[in-house]
Image (cartoon, grey):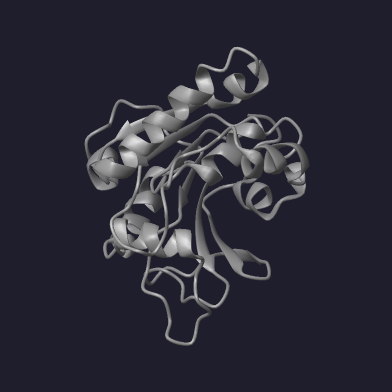
Amino acid sequence: MPLIGNLHGPIRCDFEGTVATHRRKYGGGNGQDIAKAIGISGKCKPRVLDLTAGLGRDAFVLATLGCQVTLVERNPVVQELLKDGLARALSLTDNPELATIVARMELVALEAQCYLNGNANIPQPDVIYLDPMYPESRKSAKVKKEMQAFKTLVGDDHDADHLLDLALGAARYRVVVKRARKAPQLGNAAPHFFLSGKSTRYDIYALQKLPLEL
C-alpha cells in the first residue's frame, strides 16, 4: 500500500520477507534486549498486550519467542496493513513454522484507551508493551525513510503519558516502554530499571516479580 508523497515507496506489513526471516532465525533469542525487558526466560513466556502495534515487528519477535501477543492498533490504514500481513503469513502452506508463530498474534482494531477502559472481562495481561511515536529531537539523527513515511501517516502519540498511567493499572507484572536511547521518560512515574542499546532504550516498570513459568 503506497503512502502519498516522496518520502518512501510502497510500505507493507511483511512477516515472511528477508528481514523478518533473518530476525526470526538469527535475532539472538532470549538474549535480545526486548526479550530481557519483557521478562522472557526459560519457561516464562508472558502474555503480552502491545498497545501501539504499528506494523507488528516487535510483536512478531515476541511471538517468535513463544509469547501470546495481543496487538492493539488505532490507525485504520495501519490496521489494514497488519490484517494483510497476518493473513498472508497464515496462508503459507509451505512455511508451517511461520504460521504457528503468527497464530500467537491477535489483532484488535481499536483505540488503546478504549480497549483498556472497555474490556473488564478480558484476561489480565502479564506485560503491557508501549512503543509510542513522539516528536524527533532537532539534534537527533535523520530517521530512516520508511519510518519518516510511517510517522507522516500515523503522527505522534500525544496521549502516551496517559496511556502509560492506564497500562500501569492494567498489567499484572510489568509495563515496558520502548524509547530512543536519549529520549525522556514518559509521564511522571520513573521506571524501576532500564535496558539501553546503541539507539534504543527499554524502560521497565516492575509491578511484581515474574514467576519462573508462565
Image quarter where the N terminus lies is top left
Q: Outermost residue, bottom direction?
A: 139
Please provide percent x and percent y for residue 142.
50, 76
Residue nearer the viewer, 119 or 5: 5
138 to the left or right of 25: left
Please provide percent x and percent y for residue 204.
56, 59
Residue nearer the viewer, 87 or 136: 87
17 to the left or right of 143: right
For the point 42% across and 53% down, which residue is it? Answer: 9
Q: Judge whether residue 113 can be spotted in this image.
A: yes
Relative vertical location of residue 148 with respect to residue 142 in this rendering, above or below: above
Please provide percent x and percent y for residue 117.
23, 41
Residue nearer the viewer, 52 or 21: 21
Relative vertical location of residue 184 with respect to residue 82 in this rendering, above or below: below
Location of residue 123 by image quarter: top left
Please provide percent x and percent y for residue 150.
38, 57
Q: Judge whether residue 40 can be spotted in this image.
A: no
Image quarter where the C terminus lies is top right
117 to the left or right of 183: left
